[in-house]
Amino acid sequence: MNLEKISNEEKLKLCQKYYYGGFALLPFLWIVNTIWFYKEAFMKPPYPEQACIRRYIIRSAIGGCIWIAGLTAWIVIFQRNRAEWGATADQISFIIPKGIP
């Protein structure tokens, strides 16, 4: 979709839908929202809806960063403790245990 072809009110509604969609267990929408509307929020000449769009973009960026940090932390914790938790004999394993105790 070309953002140049839709009205400013429609841009605000779309940005708002993506923001709230991130809370519906789809946090990648926050990242998409941030990337897609960044220029609209920070680089275009001012217009009435821009302040609201900017707020949604900032909040989406924060939510996306928190989500990525949490996911990364979980992956690291799981990979370090998977042998202790009993997840060593799966078929899709990328880490090969060094030895069997």
Image (spheres, helix red, strand yellow):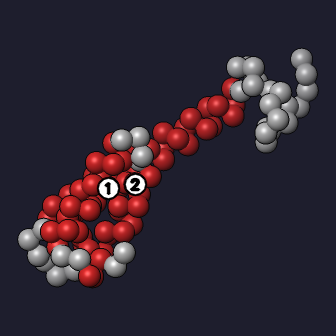
Instruction: Name the residue that disc number 2 marks.
Output: 29
Quadrant in which the C terminus appears: top right
The earlier-in-sequence mark between 1 and 2 is 1
Q: Is residue 60 above or below residue 84?
A: below
Q: Is residue 94 visible?
A: yes
**Local secondary structure at mark 2:** helix
Question: Is residue 65 rendered to the left or right of residue 19?
Answer: right
Q: From mark 1 to mark 2, how far is it between C-alphas?
A: 6 Å
Which residue occupies 48% across, 47% down? 68
Residue 92, image x, y percentages: 79, 39
The three-letter amino acid code for the residue at tag 1 is Tyr
Using the image as rendered, state which of residue 22 and residue 43 is in the foreground. Answer: 22
Which residue occupies 26% across, 61% down? 15
Which residue occupies 55% across, 43% down? 72
How dense is the environment of label 2, judged by Cα within 10 Å: few (below 14), some, or many (20 and up)? Answer: many
Examine the image and state in which quarter residue 57 appears. Answer: bottom left
Question: Is residue 43 rendered to the left or right of residue 100?
Answer: left
Instruction: Name the residue that disc number 1 marks.
Output: 18
Residue 29, image x, y percentages: 40, 54
Which residue occupies 33% across, 42% down? 23
Q: Which label was assigned to residue 74?
A: none
The three-letter amino acid code for the residue at tag 2 is Leu
**Local secondary structure at mark 1:** helix
Q: Is residue 9 above or below residue 25?
A: below
Quadrant in which the N terminus appears: bottom left
